[in-house]
């Protein structure tokens, strides 16, 4: 009964309409991640207010929130701009992601039970189906990011720390700004290998696969920059 009540309460929360502030925050954040709002671009309050349908006061709150997460730079009296991207920043985010995810996976693999296994298998199933569709019909970065993120969060979901998972999610989203071009089958194979490591509780191999996975994304992003 308690589990059913909790499930019903979560469903009610998920179905509750977002406030204008939360909706605006999610839309602006997404547009930064996917490059609709260009890196280092000035965010003119009057124009952004009109584009996202929020008041100036609400927009300032949103931009300050995004600044605290590193997606926006607040420049005092000069206003706000989208956080720039750089090779150094990409490498820093990659190193940070490896550090966080290695630790979180180790804790999660040790504590994970059958419910955790179910979350990992389910998340991988959705990601794998999405990746097959990408290979067949072309990329959808927003859909790919959704299921990629859900899979990596599932892997660490039994780490025992909400703060660690929250921090990882922010780092993952900032890192994804550099991962908009899909790498193809290499990524598919690495995700499958991570699933197999999780089910075997093989943290040593999982760490090696993850490092290869993230560093491969970095190399691919740098190559894409050179070609553009």
Image (spheres, helix red, strand yellow):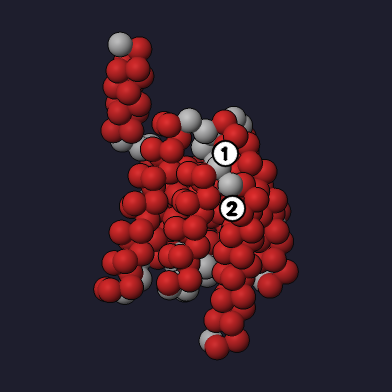
Q: Is residue 23 left or right of residue 63?
A: left
Residue at image position (29%, 67%) is 133
Q: Is residue 149 left or right of residue 214?
A: left
In the rendered image, residue 212, in percent from the top left (x then y), is placed at 61, 65
Residue 219 visible in the displayed image: yes
Q: Which residue is mark 1?
A: 109
Task: Say which mark, if any, is on residue 206.
Answer: 2
Q: Residues within 10 Å of mark 2 (few under 14, many from 20)?
A: many
Local SS, label 1: helix
Asked whether disc 2 touches disc 1, contact meaning CB atoms under 8 Å apart, the reply is yes
Please tell me whether residue 113 is drawn above or below residue 67 in the rendered image: above
Residue at image position (63%, 36%) is 107
Location of residue 158 by image quarter: top right
In the rendered image, residue 105, in percent from the top left (x then y), is placed at 60, 43
Outermost top residue: 1
Location of residue 96 by image quarter: bottom right
Towards the viewer: 102 or 23? 102
Task: Say which mark, if any, is on residue 165.
Answer: none
Q: Is residue 25 left or right of residue 94?
A: left
Outermost bottom residue: 227
């Amino acid at each position: 009964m308690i589990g059913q009540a909790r499930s019903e309460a979560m469903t009610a929360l998920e179905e509750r309409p977002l406030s204008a502030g939360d909706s605006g925050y999610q839309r602006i954040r997404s547009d930064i991640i996917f490059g609709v709002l260009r890196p280092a671009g000035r965010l003119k309050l009057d124009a952004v207010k009109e584009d996202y349908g929020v008041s100036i006061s609400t927009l300032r709150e949103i931009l300050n929130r995004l600044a605290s997460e590193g997606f926006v730079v607040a420049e005092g009296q000069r206003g706000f701009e989208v956080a720039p991207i750089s090779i150094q920043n990409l490498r820093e985010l990659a190193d940070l992601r490896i550090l966080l995810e290695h630790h979180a996976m180790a804790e999660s693999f040790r504590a994970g039970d059958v419910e955790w296994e179910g979350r990992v298998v389910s998340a991988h199933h959705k990601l794998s189906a999405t990746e097959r569709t990408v290979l067949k019909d072309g990329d959808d970065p927003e859909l790919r990011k959704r299921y990629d993120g859900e899979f990596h969060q599932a892997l660490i979901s039994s780490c025992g720390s909400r703060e660690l998972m929250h921090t990882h999610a922010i780092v993952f989203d900032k890192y994804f700004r550099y991962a908009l071009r899909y790498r193809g089958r290499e990524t598919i194979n690495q995700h499958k290998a991570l699933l197999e490591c999780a089910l075997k509780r093989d943290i040593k191999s999982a760490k090696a696969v993850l490092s290869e996975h993230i560093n491969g994304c970095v190399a691919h992003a740098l190559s894409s920059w050179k070609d553009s």
